[in-house]
Image (cartoon, grey):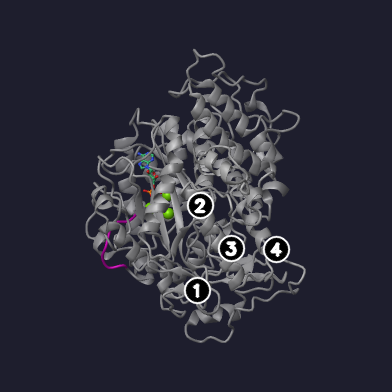
Amino acid sequence: MGLLALGTALEWPEAKLRANQVREWGIKQLLEIWNKAKGKERDAMLWGDEVEYLVVVYSKDDSKVLLSLRQAEILKALSNNEELAAAGSVPALQDETAVKPNKNSKTLPVFHPEFGRFMLEATPGKPWGIGLKELLGVEPDMKLRRQIAKEHMMSTEYPITLTTFPQIGIPGQFTHPFYPPSGPKLRSQFVPDEIANPHIRFPTLAANIRARRTRKVQVNVPIFRDKNTPIPWKDPTVNYDLHNWPEDDDVRNGAAPDNFIHMDAMAFGMGSCCLQITFQAKNIVEGRELYDQLLPLGPIMLALTAATPIYKGFVAGTDVRWNQISRSVDCRTPEELGEKPLKHDRWRIPKSRYAPNSTYISTNPRLRPEYLDPDLVFDPEIKATLIDGGMDDLLATHFAHLFIRDPIVIFEEDLQELDLTKTDHFENIQSTNWQHMRFKPPPADNNIGWRVEFRSMEIQVTDFENAAFSVFMVLITRAILSFDLNFYIPIKKVDENMERAHGIDAVLKDKFYFRKNPFPSRPSRANTAFNDDSRPGSAMPSRPGSPGTLPVEEEYAEMTINEIINGSPDGDFPGLIPIVESYLDSVNVDVQTRCELATYLSLISKRASGELDTAARWIRNFVDAHPNYKHDSVVDDVITHDLIGHVVAIGERESTGRGFAGLDVPGLSNFLGKFRATGREVIAPDAGENGEEEADR
Ligand code: ADP
Ligand code: MG
Ligand code: MG
Ligand code: MG
Ligand code: MG
Ligand code: MG
């Protein structure tokens, strides 16, 4: 759901004056939806994924790889494709929100613009349904999206699924066409304004965030300390002598500390690609439950999908994108940050508006008060309004927390009259609270249900992996509902896990707080269509012990991701994959489907155990072994060219089902193992022609 409005976007000082009106109207719209939809029942168990791409200009013979800024032209080419246009698969130009596909369109994907003018997003033409067999359609659909996207690009342009472009913001040219930094909106010393989608919403978002903060965003990532990396390390690309904008003072005021790669614009964060999954619940109660139970999985899946080891031409000391996006849209004022005493602002706010979640919302009594954040900041007046409107305390607190934020982009034309048949003002605040779970109420027309979105995962290099992680999340969600699983830990521990997920190889080296006993203390509720208690083995055995009476600190422990995913060696913690296997045992699934699902689960399992590398590890090893790499943390043009070349080759081979035979990519078998896009366990990459034939059957 985006903001559809087009019109006059207010600049910050004026937008600020209208913030209360937007909040007030947003809350009225929310109550309208809530009252209309709170009793909605029996919505179908639909779900959908979102895959984001970088578009690069790559050719074998040109050592320079560039980001293509032709998003609009590519979307236009897609819209000129009659088949896609008929299916409603492409948005009208300049409209940031995709046109919904028509009802007849079964399979054609939908393409959406994104913040970066070098990005694309694609979703399935319609959400996936309940059937387990449908899960096997995900990977072919993702491949189709990649192929269709590629067919509408120039021959040297490629859609790739790396989280970040390794050389975004380097000195010299890194975009095609070339634009010099800086511009009035971003005022970045590294990237031009033209890097952002030109739709007025996006430059305004960036400019107003900067204005609200009173300085540029500060996206600093620790440098990776290699043996030839100088200590202290000073980012050599920072220019301390610019005097074009008042914000050029930022670096003279300490914005670029030693030992950090310094970045200063929204594009460095919001220009990252991720993999998001949205689930529709049968009703609001189930939606709230799913939201809470998926919430502690956010950091675990972030670490497991780690894919972001390079920024601005330097190897980073972190493995994932999350904090960088958080900082790239951190609109907090010095008062809200606690740097100055509160005078004009209402609260100190501990987190950016892009951050891990701060509230649980389920009505399930096993949500203990101790799990909640006692210091949660929320707007008491908004909470009172919601409670007066009939909303319960927990949900009112959740929205009153989201509504501590100012709307950033406001269109003058929308402030003339409150339209309760719309949700634009509500969505304005809701959709700029970028938390790792999002609770999505039905749209104004109420034609779809309550949904939750899982947002922490990093995009993976291949569609096989993206399908695997999507499918895993679907299966764990079904297991949660079927077995009434309980993953509650204090929400502040989820924050801490999110920090830990950033560490290099956190997936293998760090421990994460996780609930020791995920099973309900009472028999499973038969609360989904999947839970058919008449079949043998349909319910996980309940374990002794009543979690409600243990001190909270004894309910959780620090575990490795291997333990969380595959189970602890002593068997105390069962492991998410074995839980999913039990779930699959409990439902009717044909042998072929089960086998194909097993290849996905096997990928997840092996990433968790370290048998297979994350994309971050694969990229680190690739850089480390490159002849041009001087062990000084610098990723130059040639290394970038070769890395992107391999990513392009893997993506193409994999999405066309040609297999990896004959493809010489260092470390590939440690990374993708003997798996590939057909979803079947097949050959090692270096197997001969016969192997490939077999694989393609
Ligand atoms: P946003 O960017 O706001 O998260 P998108 O429209 O880009 O939204 O993606 C939403 C995802 O949710 C898509 O994969 C889409 O197929 C899926 N989806 C759409 N309708 C439903 C629904 N009723 N239930 C579950 N998922 C849905
Ligand atoms: Mg969207
Ligand atoms: Mg989207
Ligand atoms: Mg989006
Ligand atoms: Mg997106
Ligand atoms: Mg989304």
Which numbered disc, 1 or 4, marks the residue closer to the eye? 4
Sequence-earlier tag: 4 or 3: 4
Residue 653 disc label: 2
Q: Nearer the viewer, mark 1 or mark 3?
A: 3
Look at label 3 and name its amino acid: Leu
Q: Is residue 71 left or right of residue 337?
A: left
Q: What is the C-alpha distance between the residues marked 4 and 2?
A: 23 Å
Under circle 3, the secondary element is helix
The residue singled out by tag 1 in the image is: 174
Q: Label 1 is placed on what type of residue?
A: Phe
Kindly check if marks 2 and 1 are in contact, taking CB atoms under 8 A apart as contact.
Answer: no
Answer whether labels 1 and 4 touch (C-beta < 8 Å): no
Residue that mark 4 sits on: 625
Query: Which residue is denoted by mark 3 in the rendering?
Result: 643
Which range is magenta? 1-9
Which residue is rendered at x = 77% and y = 68% of the image? Answer: 227
Residue at (55% x, 81% y) in the render: 249
